[in-house]
Image: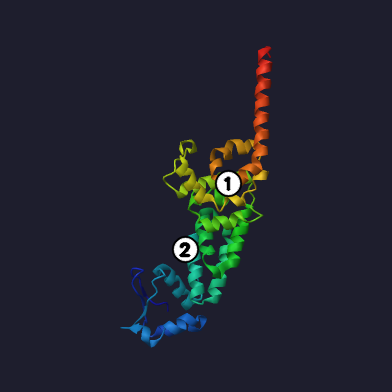
Amino acid sequence: MFPAMTMTDISQPMAFDLVGGRSKTLNRSISEYFNKILSAESVKEGKYIIKEPNISPQIFYIILKYLYTDKVDIVNLSGTEILDFIIISDGLMLRKLTKFTEHFIIENHHQFLRNDPVGIIQTLYYCKAFINLLEFFMDKICSEPEILFNSDKFIQLSAPLLENILLRDDLNLNEIEIWEKLIKWGLAQEQSLDQDVSKWNKDDFNIFKRILYKFIPLIRFYEISSKDYFHKIKPYEKILSKKLRNNIIKKEDKYIKEVAYEFIFYIEITEIGI
């Protein structure tokens, strides 16, 4: 029989009834953790008292039910809640449950990524126990980068994780798209910056340069057309090093000459009435 559980504030200890000693039906061998905590020292007034402030009552209830019935119901959890669940399962040494949840996440990865790509990969990035799961999601994002980069929460992505993604050679974005996404992300990191770069002063450019300095070397500027450079990068050119600007100045000059030539040609043909 499944025990009654007292749901309290997550900062308070959780308790569940012994139900006349029936808690002995709980499969303690399934987890070293529960075999340790479900001892006489944990019992007070006929209830097990468990102090786990990092586990929500909702998730603990699902785990407790699993320990009694060998069944688990996580279909109604959100993507980030699922990740919390698998991290907690791993921490509680519930090997079978952890494997099951990992399989469930992979089977439903598309839905989870679409709903909260930033929350999912950031949770996994800072949890070293699930490197393989992180790599699985990173592969999906690099294959379909719009899932992440078009997300409303993209600007909340941590700098180390963004750097990790941009270091990958399989990221399916061209260089000017990466630049545009970086500008969007960078502007969101400093609220004092005006969205209109033409209004920036020297201090503004220095602030923006500090925000993006780690990412600039990751962009292959030589793959960016002169036209895109002139229209999309030049307004922010002051954040680039002098060496980098000198390396790409020839392409920029070439584009300027092409624009001037086209303008002169247009004037000439209009003057003769064409």
Residue 40, given in percent of the width and then of the height, sits at 38, 87
Amino acid type at circle 1 is: Ser
Left or right: 116, with 225 as reference point = left
Which residue is outermost to the top? 273
Q: Nearer the viewer, residue 32 or 241?
A: 241
Q: Give the mark nearest the N terminus, 2 or 1.
A: 2
Residue 98, given in percent of the width and then of the height, sits at 54, 72
SS of the residue at dot 2?
helix
CA gap, disc 2 and disc 1:
43 Å
Q: Which mark is residue 54?
A: none
> Marks 2 and 1: CB-CB under 8 Å?
no
Amino acid type at circle 2 is: Glu
Which residue has dot 1 on it?
A: 241
- Tally the marks: 2
Q: Is any atom of residue 116 visible in this view?
A: no
Q: Is residue 94 above or below residue 259?
A: below
SS of the residue at dot 1?
loop
Q: Which mark is residue 81?
A: 2
Residue at screen point 39% across, 77% down? 3
Q: Is residue 96 above or below residue 21?
A: above
Residue at screen point 65% across, 48% down? 220
Q: Is any atom of residue 180 visible in this view?
A: yes
Q: Nearer the viewer, mark 2 or mark 1?
A: 1
Q: Residues within 10 Å of mark 2 (few under 14, many from 20)?
A: some
